[in-house]
Image: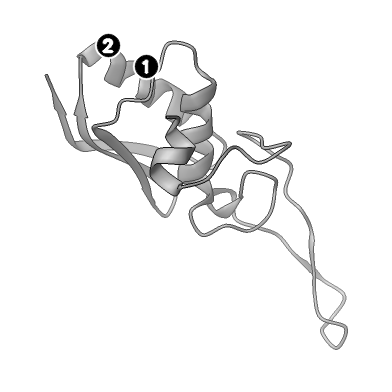
Amino acid sequence: MGWLKRLFGMEKPQNAQVNPAPQVAQAPANAPTATQSIPPERLGLNGEYDQSGLAKRVALAFDQDQQLDDVDTLWVAQTGSTVVLKGKVPSQDILNKMVSVARSVSGATNVDTNQVTIG
């Protein structure tokens, strides 16, 4: 089972991207003619607004990395623009790789591994 399926109960959407271009949300007709931009940490898999967008895109990045099998004892969450990893990983090397991949995702400003154990 992949990261997206296990963590979010979803299959990879068609055209899903780790770093998609944001969709432009149009303001209502009675609002000024400005458009809203989506904060990078709230950008979903297809550029839409998603409260858990960063965590989902990190999960997708983990799915796309051949070196990272689904470590079913680790979870991915987010607090704002910080990616939060929690649970257990088999080795420090795997954790280092996961941190590197998570940091490469647009909108991630930090990766918190305080809740991860190795072993």
In the image, what residue occupies the spot 44% across and 30% down?
A: 102
Amino acid type of disc 2? Asp
Rendering coords of residue 85 (x, y %): 29, 37
In the image, what residue occupies the spot 54% across and 21% down?
A: 64
Front-lying residue, 33 or 64? 64
- Figure quadrant of the C terminus: top left
Which image quadrant is residue 17 in?
Answer: top right
- Work out whether residue 104 can be spotted: no
9 relative position to 38: left or right = left
In the image, what residue occupies the spot 31% across and 39% down?
A: 75
| Most distant residue in the bottom direction | 30
- Work out whether residue 63 can be spotted: yes
Number of numbered discs on residues: 2
Residue assigned mark 1: 97
Amino acid type of disc 1? Lys
Mark 2: which secondary structure?
helix
Rendering coords of residue 70 (x, y %): 37, 25
User: Crowdedness of circle 1 by 10 Å Cα count: few (<14), some, many (20+)?
Assistant: some
Does the residue at mark 1 contact the one at mark 2 (Cβ under 8 Å)? Answer: yes
In the image, what residue occupies the spot 57% across and 57% down?
A: 50
Rendering coords of residue 19 (x, y %): 64, 35
Front-lying residue, 53 or 71? 71
Rendering coords of residue 62 (x, y %): 46, 26
Q: Which mark is residue 116?
A: none
User: Crowdedness of circle 2 by 10 Å Cα count: few (<14), some, many (20+)?
Assistant: few
2 relative position to 111: left or right = right
Mark 1: which secondary structure?
helix
Residue assigned mark 2: 93
Establish if 68 lies above or below 103: above
